[in-house]
Image (tube, grey):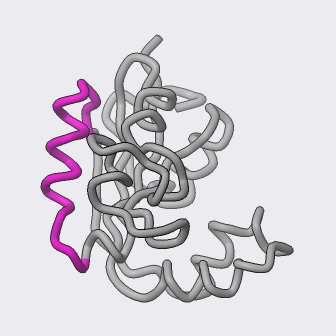
Amino acid sequence: MKERTLCIVKPDAMRKRVAGRILAMIEERGLVPVVARILTLAPGDAERFYAVHRERKFFPDLVRFMSSGPVLVAVLEGDEAIARWRDLMGPTDATKAPKGTIRGEFGTDVEKNAVHGSDAPETARAEIGFFFASLELPGATAGV
């Protein structure tokens, strides 16, 4: 089933200048970026985006990190895009991510793990809407 998911290339990967390599890995896996943009999250935007983690001890560090520099946000499309993107990303803890995954190649730890991805269709819809609400997505239908 064709679906869409959100991809964020995080500040650590942007500083390493590997966004192009990450996009190439995405395309090699058969996922298609249908819209993308580069921006720097204001701390308040990072707080809103990661609000689900507000009560967690790491939340202030996460907000600081995600607003520390540019990120590339993209909508990826393809058959079973959410599961395929999560598989390509690898485990959240980059120290446990196998080589060949994005986090295994470009991440360094749990926080600086190069990329973010939606974990379910409902999350994907909300996360895509957070970054692309004012943009018309090619081929978009209700429910993304």
Task: Please say whether residue 23 is one of the residues in the magenta stretch.
Answer: yes
Q: How many numbered badges does the structure rendering display?
A: 0
* Quadrant position of residue 90: top left
* Residue at the outermost right position: 55
Q: Is residue 53 left or right of residue 11?
A: right
Relative depth, front residue between 51 and 25: 25
Residue 91 lies, in percent from the top left, at 51, 47
* Residue at the outermost top position: 1
Relative depth, front residue between 86 and 100: 100
Q: Is residue 97 left or right of residue 129?
A: left
Establish if 27 lies above or below 123: above
Name the residue at 48% across, 37% down: 86
Establish if 106 lies above or below 136: below
Name the residue at 65% across, 43% down: 123
Name the residue at 58% across, 78% down: 45
Residue 108 lies, in percent from the top left, at 39, 69
Establish if 100 lies above or below 130: above
Name the residue at 52% across, 32% down: 144
* Quadrant position of residue 77: top left
Residue 17 lies, in percent from the top left, at 16, 71
Relative depth, front residue between 37 and 20: 20
Residue 35 lies, in percent from the top left, at 29, 47
Task: Please say whether residue 93 is one of the residues in the magenta stretch.
Answer: no
Relative depth, front residue between 21 and 34: 21
Magenta residues span 15-33
Q: Is residue 24 left or right of residue 83?
A: left
